[in-house]
Image (cartoon, rainbow, N blue to C red):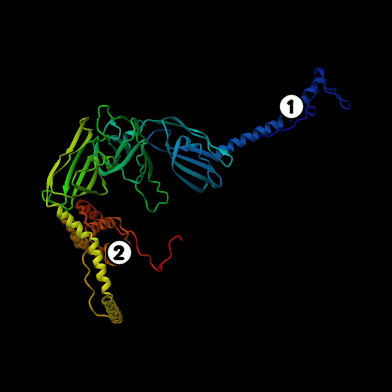
Amino acid sequence: MVGQFTMRNVNCANVSSHATPGNAEPQLGKAGPRPARGSVSRSTHANRIAQLLQPVLLVLLTLLVSVAHADDQLKASVDRNAIGIDETLTLTLRFSGTGSGQPDFELLQQNFDILSSQQSNQYQVINGRAESFVEWTLALAPKRQGKLFIPSLHYQGQVSDAIPIQVTEAGQAPDSGNRQAFLEVEPDKKQVHVQEQLLVKVRLYTTVGLHDIATEPLQIAGAHVEKVDEQRYERRINGVGHAVYELTYAVFPESSGDLTIPALNYVAVAGRRDPFSLFNRNTQRLRLRSEPQTIKVLPKPDSYSGAQWLPAASLGISQTWSKDPHSFTVGEPITRIITIRGEGLRAAQLPPLPKLNVDGLKTYPDQPQQDDQADGNGITGSRIETTALVATKPGDYQLPPITVTWWDTKSGRQRATQLPAFRFTVTGSAAAMSAQNANSNPAPESAAAEGTTHASSDHFWRNIAIAALASHLLWVLYFLALRRRGSRPSNTPKQFQPDAGQQARALEEAAANGDAAEIQQAALNWLRARWPGVQGNSLGEINRELGLDELGRLQEQLDAALYSTPPKPLNRQQVVILVQRLLKVERVHTPVADAKPLPDLFA
């Protein structure tokens, strides 16, 4: 409290008195007795001391008023001083008066994360006294355990007091027994080999309604991470029902050593949101934090003898043929499709197959296809290699076996998967193959004879050209007449549009049958039913308008099977995959409107 001080200067000489001995009264009309020299000196000295102390007292008074005024100007308070590392606290900073801007919170961010910040300006009258103040409300989350401090904050030349905060371990705070929500991270293994799949499940438990959940994706230094599954279910813990939101990640360490799963931070709002409230004071912002964990990553075992390191839960190899493999004939192409599938391996980790080199067989390998399928058990990668085989001579053939060595992560030992050798017999004769090549490549003598015949019949072809020109002019006139007739209004009913779903099923059946011409026609029918406004009479013309990658790759397969010489065998399995993907895609390029009916918002 500020006190009031009054200073007075008193002349000691004017108030001093002199008493006569024997209590005799002083004589009137005579000068009084002369004061002693020591008495005058003391009064003068006291007066000088009072004059010297006056400015010092004024300075002290000013400092006291300034300190008291500062305490009233900027005050900081928190809702609690002891929290867990996974909890939050609320800091309220009030400035009595008016001002612009906000305090500098840079020092505050050294020990705390600022999850949210609100500013309010208020004016109130209490007992006839008006007061205005600015208030900042901050939700803070500690960055580490131990004794932390909310530092002194500065604003408009005023300074707030520092506040100590005690941060304990997760679940050790005084009110942690009734936590509304918490975060859990659970790996399926404590140690793995390098490049082996590690499944990490992140679970968010809550007993109250949460909204505005800001999740933090799992990122691990030195590892490849992919989210493979997402589930919601309910679990009872100590008789209390908890809603669980679970994310599963597949983690592939890239090097041996210690792999650290960092602490995750989720921010959510608990409580019922009031749509008519501006600040939603009935809600509470929560910061959920998990504990970091360390996984030991082992190097490749020294006993492993495989050409490539393949740690997998299982690995299999299968092959299929485009036709019956027991009816090979000379010159007839047939397609061999080999699929390698590894559980717990990405497709990029699977090795390429050895090249096929068999005397009497021509091979035409296609571009390999890689695919990753994700589920709750992780990633299953597959590699599909397609090769067209053409026999140049009859006889008995044998395709060598294919062996892939891998490491079984379940049993912890080396294993090998083998595709057995394949024997088949090719019938026919080499003369048939030569005749086929001769038909595709005419002899020079035949070409020369054809040139002579062409030279002797110039007049005949000239007459044909004249007739063709005349017929072309007639067709032009005919189409002009049809165009005039088509411009008139017609009362004919609108043509029935085919069902896109029905055409999609027809395209799937055609792809399963493996007939290139049938697939091409079915694809055209489906495209016209799916997008009635497209133009073009071929897959290439339609794809120039749609811009679909799957359609372009399907067209390449069909063109190679229909128009190549000799025709290339159709990869039925790859066509089925392309058709399935094509039926799920949306149109990439959309037509640009000539005019916009409404202007863009926030233009």
Residue 314, picture quadrant: top left
Q: Secondary structure at mark 1?
A: helix
Please provide percent x and percent y for residue 226: 31, 42
* Residue that numbered label 2 is attached to: 541
* As drawn, 598 above or below 158: below
> Who comes first in sequence, dot 2 or dot 1?
1
* As drawn, 271 above or below 406: below
Please provide percent x and percent y for residue 317: 19, 41
Q: Is residue 152 left or right of residue 291?
A: right
Please provide percent x and percent y for residue 409: 23, 33
Position of the N terminus by quadrant = top right
Q: Secondary structure at mark 2?
A: helix
Residue type at mark 2 is Glu
Can residue 352 be seen here? The reply is yes
* Residue that numbered label 1 is attached to: 49
Residue type at mark 1 is Ile
